[in-house]
Amino acid sequence: MTGLAHFAVRRLALGLLQTAAVVVLVFVLTEALPGDAAVALAGDQPDPARVEAIRQAMRLDEPAAQRFADWVLGLLRGDLGTSLVSGRPVSSYLAGGLGPTLLLAGITLALLVPLSLVLGVAAAGREGGPLDRAISTVTVGLYAVPEFALGILLITVVALRGGLLPPTAVGAGGDLLAQPAVLVLPVAVLLARPVCSLSRLVRAGMVEALASDYVRHARRQGLGEARVRYAHALPNALAPAVQQLARTTDWLLCGVIVVEALFVIPGLGTLLVEAVAARDVPVVQGLAVVFGLVTVVVNLAADLVVHRLAPRGEVVA
Amino acid sequence: MTTPHTPRARHTRRAFLGAAGGAAALTTLAAAGCSAGSTSGTPEPGTDAAGSPRRGGRLRATFAGGGASETLDPHRTNLFVEAARAKALFDKLADFGSDMSPQPRLAESWEPSTDATRWTVRLREAVFTDGTPLTAADVLHSYRRITDPEGAFRARASLESIDLDASRAVDDRTVEFVLKHPYAEFPNALAAFGAYIVKDGAEDFTEPVGTGPFRFVSFTPGSSMVAARHDAYWDGAPYLDEIEFLVANEETARINALLGGQVEYAHELTPTTARTHEGGGQVTVVRLPRSAMQAFVMKTDRAPFDDPRVREAFFLIADRQQLVDSALAGAGEIGNDLFGKGYQYYADSIPQRTRDLDRARALLREAGAENLTVRLDTSEVAAGFVEAATVFAEQAAEAGVTVEVVMGNKDTYWSDILDSGQLCCYRSGSMPIESHISQRLLTDSTTNASKWQREDFDALYEQAQATLDEAARTDLYARMQRTLHAEGGFLVWGFADWIIATANNVGGVDREAPANSLGWARFDKVWLA
């Protein structure tokens, strides 16, 4: 086994362990929340007899350990369980929410990576020059605007005043690709802040790399400026950006709740909020598993890429 | 029977409301009473800004929803959107007019026995969307399902007075209900929230079949339901070809979708949104007055509120107009410590209570409760709750009472305040005054938050339910309400408007109907100009 593969396996095993820990923690925490699904479901009609009947129907009267064990056993068979509230399989919940979220995350990432690279490299090209200052001003300023405010602003100006794009994805349902116009504003909002942080990181990395000994050395060797820049400086400059990108991916996949709510996109973030409010533990658990695995895999991938880009910058597993 | 509440989805602008109709509607509907009859509540065609009714089109209506757990099982309706969808696909035997009096629907008529323990209900000629006719067997199956103790259906408590084992189908279109005790207001049970009539044997509602004005086409939980006109609908086929219910939990998203032309009807908007767009010409804002009772509940069985003088002092401390202006952003009117302003049997002859701090201080002194400190439970469970608590604490301070505002968990609030605490914020949607009393104010009521437990009061309620003469019953309700006004535990300080908005080409929207009443979210009488 090569060093890299060994590293990957070790990281994956650790990641699975972490995911399992998260799942246990989620169960314990949801048990500790005040009230159970029966109370949440009874709502403004908390007739004690009715709450008790709901509790029995949901098998909430069984001990927590028993319910947890049943759930874990099911999980090992690939069964995520059924929702307490609707009785439908948790997997159908995930399937429903995953599509829109993956689509949004995918499009955002596909735009995010080239855009931040171009901006970062361009800004670093002439440090302190007008282009650098312009890019820096815009990115720092934009980064300070919360998603919610930016979303409302875009909806008001672009959709309602300008009439250029639809204000929400209402009516598009799960099939967002059928009406691509509804995706433009949500993606713009999702893109706004990560593009700022990433391009800043790329810029900082490039500035540092361009001033480093090995770049000076490469220049002394008489290599062309473009080659120095893209083949030598850029890979070293990217390591911190890749790790930031992994964190951004988690954030996108776990559903940006604000964006989903504002634009009415029924993704995983919305699902999580609803499930926690309803104390629908199996759904929360199922989401925790998915989020945990995604986080582990994405961060693993990022570490591997960093390993490859800058092997000297040791990565702590 | 209660109004839909939002235990599952958590968005603070969620309400469970109902509006009282105007005085005119009140009298006509009361006169329609409990015999055979016509439907009610729809405005005269031709009076609408959208012109006279015309056929065709798909109306898209957006509501707050409950996410992926939403169901089409009409007996499990819990949210406004579920109630609105159930109403499109199903019918109840009766439904509430704008004054919360029961109006015949699938029941053509109802006749009580002389002691009000046996009710003969005659069904109208109606067909399900699969073409089969409605029969007594469908009714009995539906009610048996709702009252199944395993099912924990919401309407079960409302139908509990029926002895279903003794009840029977007299013929295909006649049901005889045998009750466990006299119940003059039995038609209220037939109109109960969630008491829909499904087909005999129906248990699976993935493709529901009902007698409603629309027939099911498609459903994605938490997102959309489409239904098409039921041409053989007994109450006349709808004007619309199709209705689509769309879910948008954020109020901003609902109004934006309406402004952007993505929907034609937006349910549940804030007073701020209404003010912004009212008169602007872009959309039509509809305010349904006297929709949600807003109150503070005092627990009458424990200190300090076990002393009626303290309760009266609190009634006198409240500056109701200030509460309406701040907690409801002015979108409402003041209350008089009684539920059901404008509804059938409401005692509007009782004078409006006004603020009197001197009298309040004197009462507190008499009760030995000077320098009183009280805990007030509130939560973000409903719009305006926290504001109301804060404002009331300031008002109480002027009378020398310290009110400590305690924030509770919004997911479990209603259950938390049921037995614990002293004073709490409370809200209720529309229901008949009889239901409010039976659910909340009798010794054995299941959700008796004010812990009002008085044998003489229980006896008055029982007497009213054994009295078939309506005038006599009205007197009994007045007596109950005078007692509640004088020394009850509900400090009802206001009634909130319910706000919806439509595109300007939508006609036929009822402007008086409380949420969950017959005219509310009634899309079979709505048209697109």
Image (cartoon, coloured by chain):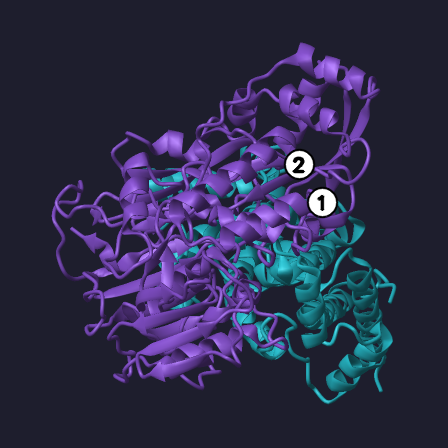
Residue B104 left/right relative to A189: left
Residue farthest along the bottom direction in this orientation: A77
Q: Colour of chain B?
A: purple
Q: Residue at x 32, y 41 (%)?
A: B26
Q: Residue at x 75, y 72 (%)?
A: A60
Q: Disc 2: which chain?
A: B
Disc 2 marks which residue? B489
Residue B437: mark: none
- Spot occupied by residue B473 in the image (x, y as percentages of width and height): 45, 46
Q: Colour of chain A?
A: cyan
- Spot occupied by residue A65 in the image (x, y as percentages of width and height): 86, 76
Labels 1 and 2: the sequence-earlier one? 1
Seen in the picture, residue B411 relative to A139 is either above or below; the reply is below
Name which quarter of the figure residue A3 lies in: bottom right
Q: Nearer the viewer, residue B350 or B114?
A: B114
The local crowd at label 2, few if under 14, some if 14 to 19, many if 20 or more residues have their Cα within 10 Å, is many
- Spatial CA distance of label 1 from label 2 is 8 Å
The local crowd at label 1, few if under 14, some if 14 to 19, many if 20 or more residues have their Cα within 10 Å, is many
Q: Please say if the residues under marks 1 and 2 sit with CB atoms less than 8 Å apart.
A: yes
Residue A118 visible from this viewpoint: no
Name which quarter of the figure residue B161 lies in: bottom right
Disc 1 marks which residue? B451
